[in-house]
Amino acid sequence: MEYVRSLKSLFVISHHRLPLRYSLPRCCSNLANTSVRSKERRTTADKFKTRLSSGPSFQEFVKAVSVKRTSHGEYSDQHGYLSEDLDMGNSRKVYFETYGCQMNVNDTEIAWSILQRRGYQRTFDLNEADVVLLVTCSVREKAEQTIWNRLQQLTAMKKKRLKTHTPMKIGILGCMAERLKTELLEQEKLVDVIAGPDAYRDLPRLLTLADGGHQVSNVLLSLEETYADIMPVHHAPQGYSAFVSIMRGCDNMCSYCIVPFTRGRERSRPVRSILEEIRVLSDQGVKEVTLLGQNVNSYRDTSEQQFGGSDLTKLSRGFKTVYRTKQGGLRFSDLLDAVSRIDPDMRIRFTSPHPKDFPDEVLHLIAERGNICKQIHLPAQSGSSQVLKAMRRGYTKEAYLGLVENVKRIIQGVSLSSDFISGFCGETEEDHQQTLSLIREVGYNVGFLFAYSMRKKTHAFHRLPDDVPAEVKQRRLVECISVFREEAARVNAALVGSTQLVLVEGESKRSAKDLCGRTDGNMKVIFPKEDVAVHTSESNTGPINAGDYVLVKILSSNSQSLRGRALSHSSLRDTVAHCEPLSRHQVDEHVASDTSMIETCH
């Protein structure tokens, strides 16, 4: 305290009023007196600096704080004010429920990896759980209402648990945590822990504080967090497929979308971290990897110096952005190239892309590589140029159709899927008819269609009236779904008689006598469970298991699936042209080389 008193004395301000004095300018100067005063000021300043340097530091006020950077440039999650044993899970059991998109599935794997390191155990039985964590979605009102209903059920269960067991803690993770922190903590008081998408490293600390009876939250968004050094614990069905996050956040600022406000700005995970995770998955026998991101094909890694440069990001022809064109970095085409070379018998998918980020080099790469699926998601959202402008999508209906034509020209036999919103602000009946026209003209085989749900914080919430009545939204949605199914049935019927390579997922949900899997175009195929030839040229037969590739003859179809009969076991190597795999060292060297080059198959 002596230091504090001595410092305080330097900042004492007199409260006595001093009379104002005016001094007239003099014709002569007193340089000697000025020099003395200047010297006195320097002496006083030096004494002050000496006292500061010898006094208590910030670290002494926050005892035992340890702030370290990881090898990936991110900060460690050590908290000096919590002892090591308090921060541990001590074998407490965690139960996860995941809602929403594939990014939330990946977030669950990341959160579980972090908690597992701290000594928590995972349970798939809710009745055994000490901690229940809901990984939430906030894109639509219906998704949020589902979570509210579930919280009421869990709170009732928690109250019963207090009488017989250790108190159960309830946590909200993900987008809804960031958007509704105040309502969750202060108004409804239904949860103990809230962690936003960029705060999963803080979960052990938050859970420790919650054990002390506190309601705690961390919903801070980051400009850097990618969880690059966290190896997710994958829990895919049968272990045959996995999701790999390559970037987080979104810069597009579409007027209807909450994502930039719940997940923050775009930042890409370092390429070497991604490749290492996919190599591990390949070694574990995973047969399909889906690259994930809110705007997955705008990937741009600037983590290393050699990835810099002045070349501008290329867009699809006729498309534009609300932000200034970005420069430098390793692009999506370069990452996709490197990923496809790790294991030629592993399928590569990616979602969710934006139509603006499909320059020709990405399309040519997809066409050339046998293990990159010939299926592209092109979310249109509307078929009206006027509505697209209000949505701030950065393209017209004509530009979108031009992209579809280019995709079909370059990638033969490509399957297309899309998203559509019915009843957006200001949508007229003519706008709706243009959307129906677009659906018929393109011919998608998979679609995700929803009625518009206004979200707070968005551009539309602040600037546009939600003026389409709910009943009109629902009618238009039903009409869009009807036309979509008609076109999907037509597209799928064209596959009858063909032979498709199918990655088996397991038993069909409707019958234990059938198996189901997916084609390269991501269409579900159902076929009888029976032994088939081990190879097309062999007579020996063997059973079909989840994770196997089989050739299936398509016999019938509808708008949602295909039916057929398995012919034989197979592989990507045997059925499609593929690239020679590179060694790990060769892949790393390829990534670090001139990123403007896209190599063709050997």
Image (cartoon, grey):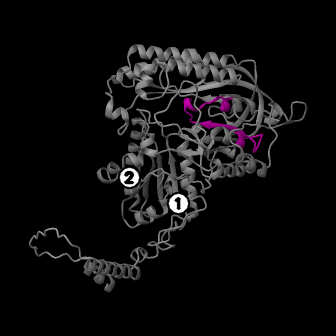
Instruction: Evaluate whether residue 222 shows in this view.
Output: yes
Q: Quadrant of residue 347?
A: top right
According to the image, label 2 marks what residue?
155
Crowding at label 1, few (<14), some or many (≥20) Cα neighbours within 10 Å? Answer: some
Is 342 within the magenta? yes
Q: Quadrant of residue 471?
A: top left
- Distance between mark 1 and mark 2 Cα atoms: 18 Å
Quarter of the picture containing the N terminus is: bottom left
User: What residue type is disc 2 on?
Assistant: Thr
User: Mark 2 falls on what kind of element?
Assistant: helix
Q: Position of residue 542 (x, y in %)?
A: 83, 37
Q: Position of residue 179 (x, y in %)?
A: 38, 45
According to the image, label 1 marks what residue?
93
Instruction: Evaluate whether residue 531 shows in this view.
Output: no
Q: Position of residue 394 (x, y in %)?
A: 48, 28
Q: How many marks?
A: 2
